Amino acid sequence: MLIKRPAPIPASEITDEPIYRERRRFLGQFALGSGALLLPGMLTADERPPRFDEVAPGPFGTDEGLTSYGDVTSYNNFFEFGTGKEDPKRHAHQLQTRPWSIMVEGHAERTGPIDIEDILRLHPLEERIYRMRCVEAWSMVIPWVGFPLAALLKHAQPTSRAKYVEFTTLHDPEQMPGQRDRRILPWPYVEALRIDEAMHPLTILAVGLYGREMPNQNGAPLRLVVPWKYGFKSIKSIVRIRLLDTQPRTTWHQSAPREYGFYANVNPEVNHPRWNQSRERRIGELRRRTTLPFNGYAEEVAQLYRGMDLHKNY
Ligand code: MTE
């Protein structure tokens, strides 16, 4: 993972954060308990196609300043489209995101393909404003649109043998030119979580950001977001989910086990051989910030790792 300077963003692309926040606040006043937004005379959430601009604020939000839309969508890691930070924005338009389905396999009652349109109806969409901390020591604050991964897993009904959840990105070198070069990574990109991490309410499948459909470079049509882990766990453009009884091999951990752990919880006390993890560069800011354990979500998730040596299990 190489760091390049972000390209300057045209002013027209940068969403005015105060206006965006005010719109969110307004929508929040109409939100129902479930997080859905329904106005009189509108169809129920089950009947209407999801509207990304009508999404009510969900739990766990942060008040920290949002990273601009321009930065979030032009400074990316998506190695299937190249290793430069601007490559995904330049090349990801080639990716066809409809039709799209996810194949559910393994230890679950309901396996088989599930279409993206049916996935979008499983749970009302919510806005989740999360910090994202990359292992390369940069960070952003992103207003995702998505729903708890738990909703999809509950739909699949994992059996008691399901201990891990493995995710796989589309493998199609025609559409993803980076996949023609196996020196970059062993393709397809695979990531995984322990089942309790996957069921945790902070863990979401994101289908949009900034109230819009997910840009291809950010992992359209659907990606994982696990905010207390380094960004590489948040796998993009998912086509397969497998429920497994043993810990699967994941792409970065397999490529360099001493650099990228399976758990990869943000941990300011354990440095990466190339990046000091105690501080981070928030994209769009000049001063570096202190990195927080579990990326600031310790209260919500530290109990998942009770009894584990977090230095070893990095
Ligand atoms: N998923 C796939 N399929 N391919 C990738 O190269 N990069 C990861 C993660 N998910 C990656 C991926 C890394 S290293 C990071 S930091 C985040 O996506 C970046 O997400 P963003 O580009 O939306 O900020």
Image (tube, helix red, strand yellow):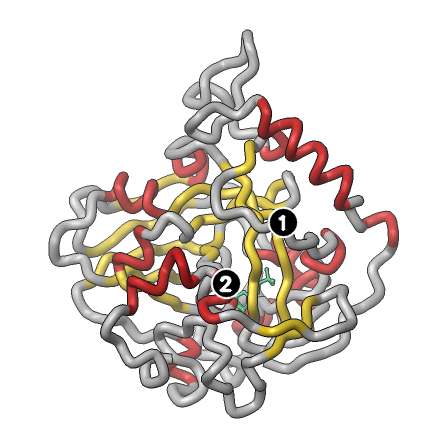
Give how far across and how far down residue 51 sits, in percent. 58, 29
- At mark 2, the secondary structure is helix
Question: Is 171 located above or below residue 51 in the figure?
Answer: below
The CB of the residue at mark 2 lies under 8 Å from ligand 1 = no
- Which residue in the rendered view is the most extreme toward the top? 41
Tell me the tag on residue 63.
1
- Which residue in the rendered view is the most extreme toward the front? 299
Q: Nearer the viewer, residue 55 or 30?
A: 30
Q: Residue at x 32, y 59 (%)?
A: 197
Give how far across and how far down residue 224 sits, in percent. 45, 55
The residue at which mark 2 appears reads as 296
Question: Is 103 located above or below residue 280 in the figure?
Answer: above
Quarter occupied by residue 174: bottom right
Q: Residue at x 55, y 9 (%)?
A: 40
Q: Amino acid at mark 2?
A: Gly
Give how far across and how far down residue 88 sits, in percent. 66, 64
Q: Is residue 97 visible?
A: no
Q: Amino acid at mark 1?
A: Asp
Q: Nearer the viewer, residue 146 or 88?
A: 146
Quarter occupied by residue 28: top right
Whether residue 58 sits left or right of residue 105 in the image: it is right
- Answer with mark 1 or mark 2, whichever residue precedes in sequence: 1
- At mark 1, the secondary structure is loop
Q: Is residue 111 visible?
A: yes
Give how far across and how far down residue 150 sits, in percent. 33, 46
